[in-house]
Amino acid sequence: MSTIGDSSGTGSTEPEETPGQEEATVADGRVSDAVDSREEETTEELSRDLVFDVLKNRRRRYALHYLRRADGSVQLSELAEQVAAWENDTTVDAISAAERKRVYTALYQSHLPKLDDASIVEYNQNRGIVELSDASEQLDVYLDLDAQPDIPWCNWYLGLAVAGLGVLTAAWLGLPPFSLVADVLLATLIVAAYAAVALAHVYFTRHAAAANEAPPELQEA
């Protein structure tokens, strides 16, 4: 008696894959591998020259400060209003239309495209939406005020005062080698030391402020 059904006699009911199905499976695997490889790619490191070039402009620093505090993407109009308020040391409600427009135009035409080209933000110019990219995290060390080293300048001045007093006392008591140096020369050296520390203090303060200037309300926080 013949068996009706599978001519091979195995009794298998599983459908065989056609050549088209096999090609689709291979294609899906390749797409999956491509997606996985893109996900595994690390964020490209920003060069120091690029970071300094981006942060040398105060308006761009203000924009980055605001985007860091935002949760996700923000409207360009909203960003421009806050940056204009910071620049004019006032509130958003108090800025004029001209101040708002000036900042909006500069962000729209120049600053945000520059940040987008540097892969620091993701900027949709047509929709007027901007948000930080993953690469922007590399700027945190430069934008964060707490990242700046806290040089105890008062200790430097106090140390100079103690050292100067000790040198003058030793000269007054006739202790060598200070007794061999004229009083005028000792005083000149002490004044020169104070001047050097003062100049270093001024230089550091100005350059630190230029590189890491935070919006007024963050400075007060």
Image: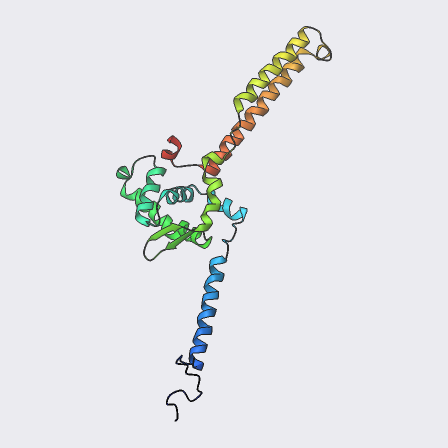
State the residue lying farthest toward the front: 1
Q: Quadrant of the N terminus?
A: bottom left
Q: Indicate the position of residue 153 as horizontal and vertical percent values.
A: 53, 24
Task: Give the left or right position of residue 172, taking residue 122 as reference.
Answer: right
Q: Is residue 171 above or below residue 14?
A: above
Task: Give the left or right position of residue 82, taking residue 172 as reference.
Answer: left
Q: Quadrant of the C terminus?
A: top left
Q: Indicate the position of residue 184 as horizontal and vertical percent values.
A: 65, 13
Indicate the quadrant where residue 175 lies. top right
Q: Residue at x 33, y 45 (%)?
A: 79
State the residue lying farthest toward the bottom: 1
Give 21 or 199, whichever is nearer the viewer: 21
Tag count: 0
Q: Residue at x 38, y 37 (%)?
A: 215
Give 36 or 132, whichever is nearer the viewer: 36
Q: Is residue 41 above or below residue 54?
A: below
Q: Is residue 171 above or below residue 96?
A: above
Task: Give the left or right position of residue 138, taking residue 72 as reference.
Answer: right
Indicate the quadrant where residue 85 lies. top left
Q: Residue at x 29, y 43 (%)?
A: 98
Q: Indicate the position of residue 34 as horizontal and vertical percent values.
A: 48, 65
Q: Indicate the position of residue 41 as horizontal and vertical percent values.
A: 50, 57
